[in-house]
Image (spheres, rainbow, N blue to C red):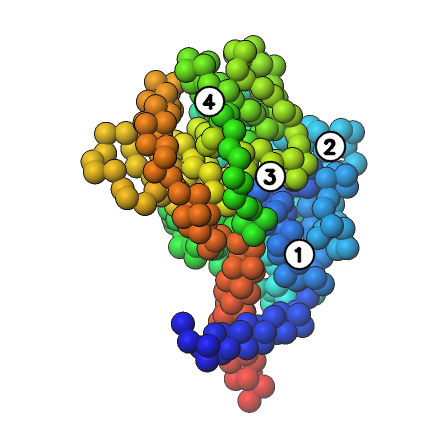
């Protein structure tokens, strides 16, 4: 790209930023109780729109990072429930009512950050509503039966969940019409939006702090798994595979499955718990490879690992197919340039096979190439793409209204 063209793009982007700064903006996020992928997206939006107000169902202020602390944050009436920041999933039937109580009068732009029910807010007729969708609510749709069959659910709880989910599905579909424009965090999620909502979505991958990564000359002998210890992350597969192969495994993260996973773990498995960002980076930089056994909508963790030049062994479905350049065991020929290995089934046997294949070609992985492949997921890229998309859609949204006002005034 020529320097003249870059200058034109930079000038246009600066104009878009200036135009957006004149708008009154509301950011609606489902809940703020822990810093995960969705919260990182919200932080980037908050930095991009420093004058925006934030609305959320429940808030744990201890979970807030600096990008959010300077913003006015409004919570719903659910915040007043005892233990709301811990037991909010049990308040699922009240989510629609709570969201619809938010007063968004006077806002020009509403951006909902959605993998819970945030898109269900009621917006004024003059406000453009953009939904950045991490996924349609999976516990209502493609993962409903898995949630319903979860161990430890009593019969009464299972019945209440089933009835609530049935009602919530109708509400979820009804609120699709409240969104003017959908943005999906991946092609994977865009296809899910099309299936469940019958709407098209523009794809903008979420922001990942790729620039914080670096290549370490010293690599350890351990595999790494990073994420919440919950069912769908399938950390159990990583544990059992490393038990079988007697490979060192470090697990970063905590969650409700900790005790069960601890019982599964053999002597080579080490639980590190929740770690600050700097400690997580250290583990990324020196790991042999990341094991990513869950099916994610996008999955920031594989991108983070690759930003340190480390290969990824991932389940070959979902967002990993968009962020990892890999192959499945048995594929021929093996690609010349690759950043990981996929396994075809969420089973211990399939993961073990992928790990063995990885170890047989481990020297072919080039850390510099791996790191270069994920540079396109950096935070600045996200902000630039979102700014351009919102500016274009605000113009599109306003044009028919301005034309109508002109005709009425004549």
Q: CA distance from mark 3 to mark 4?
A: 20 Å
Mark 2–mark 1 distance (CA, rounded to whole Å): 24 Å
Percent coordinates x, y for residue 277 in the rendering: 65, 39
Q: CA distance from mark 1 to mark 3?
A: 24 Å
Q: Nearer the viewer, mark 1 or mark 3?
A: 3
Residue count near mark 4 (Cα–Cα under 10 Å), binned few <14, some 14–19, many ≥20: many
What residue sits 46% from the left and 32% below the top?
A: 289
Question: Which residue position is annotated with label 4?
Answer: 238
Mark 4: which secondary structure?
helix
Closest to the observer: 3 or 53? 3
**Element on which disc 3 rests:** helix
In the rendered image, the vertical position of residue 227 relative to residue 54, given as above or below: above
- Near mark 2 (Cα within 10 A), the count class, few <14, some 14-19 or many ≥20, is some
Of marks 4 and 1, the one in the foreground = 4
Q: Which residue is depicted at the point 40% across and 33% down? A: 314
As drawn, 300 above or below 397: above
Q: Which residue is mark 1?
A: 46
Residue 351: in sight, yes or no? yes
* Rendering coords of residue 284 (x, y %): 55, 36
Q: Residues within 10 Å of mark 3 (few under 14, many from 20)?
A: some
- Residue under the image location 68 percent in, 36 percent down: 276
Which of discs 2 and 4 lies nearer the camera? The answer is: 4
Give the tally of numbered discs: 4
Q: Residue 281 — which label?
A: 3
Q: Is residue 152 left or right of residue 51?
A: left
Residue positioned 51% across, 25% down in the render: 222
Quadrant of the rendering where the C terminus is positioned: bottom right
- Residue 84: assigned label: 2
Q: Where does residue 113 sit, x and y in percent of width and height?
A: 58, 49
Depth check: 138 or 409 in front? 138
Dot in front, 3 or 2 = 3
């Amino acid at each position: 790209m020529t320097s003249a063209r870059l200058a034109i793009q930079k000038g246009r982007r600066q104009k878009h930023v200036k135009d957006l700064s004149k708008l009154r903006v509301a950011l609606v996020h489902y809940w703020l109780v822990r810093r995960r992928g969705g919260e990182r997206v919200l932080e980037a939006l908050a930095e991009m729109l420093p004058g925006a107000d934030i609305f959320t169902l429940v808030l744990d202020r201890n979970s807030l990072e600096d990008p959010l602390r300077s913003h006015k944050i409004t919570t719903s009436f659910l915040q007043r429930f005892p233990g709301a920041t811990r037991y909010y999933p049990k308040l699922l039937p009240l989510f629609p009512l709570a969201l619809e109580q938010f007063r968004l009068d006077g806002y020009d732009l509403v951006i909902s950050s959605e993998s819970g029910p945030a898109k269900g807010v009621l917006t004024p007729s003059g406000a453009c509503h953009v939904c950045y969708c991490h996924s349609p609510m999976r516990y209502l749709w493609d993962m409903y039966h898995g949630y319903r069959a979860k161990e430890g659910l009593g019969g009464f709880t299972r019945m209440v969940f089933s009835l609530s989910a049935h009602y919530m599905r109708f509400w979820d579909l009804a609120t699709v019409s409240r969104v003017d424009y959908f943005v999906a965090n991946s092609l994977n999620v865009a296809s899910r939006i099309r299936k469940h909502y019958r709407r098209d979505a523009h794809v903008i991958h979420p922001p990942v702090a790729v620039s914080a990564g670096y290549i370490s000359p010293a690599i350890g002998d351990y595999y790494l798994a990073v994420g919440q210890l919950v069912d769908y992350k399938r950390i159990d597969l990583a544990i059992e595979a490393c038990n079988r192969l007697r490979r060192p495994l470090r697990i970063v993260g905590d969650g409700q499955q900790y005790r069960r996973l601890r019982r599964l773990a053999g002597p080579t498995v080490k639980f590190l718990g929740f770690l600050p960002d700097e400690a997580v980076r250290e583990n990324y930089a020196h790991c042999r490879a990341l094991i990513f056994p869950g099916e994610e909508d996008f999955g920031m963790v594989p991108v983070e690992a690759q930003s340190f030049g480390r290969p990824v062994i991932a389940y070959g479905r979902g967002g990993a197919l968009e962020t990892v350049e890999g192959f499945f065991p048995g594929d021929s020929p093996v690609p010349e340039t690759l950043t990981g290995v996929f396994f075809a089934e969420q089973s211990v046997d399939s993961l073990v096979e992928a790990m063995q294949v990885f170890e047989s070609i481990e020297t072919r992985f080039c850390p510099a190439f791996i790191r270069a492949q994920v540079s396109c997921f950096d935070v600045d890229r996200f902000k630039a793409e979102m700014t351009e998309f919102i500016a274009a859609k605000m113009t599109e949204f306003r044009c028919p209204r301005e034309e109508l006002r002109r005709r009425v005034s004549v």
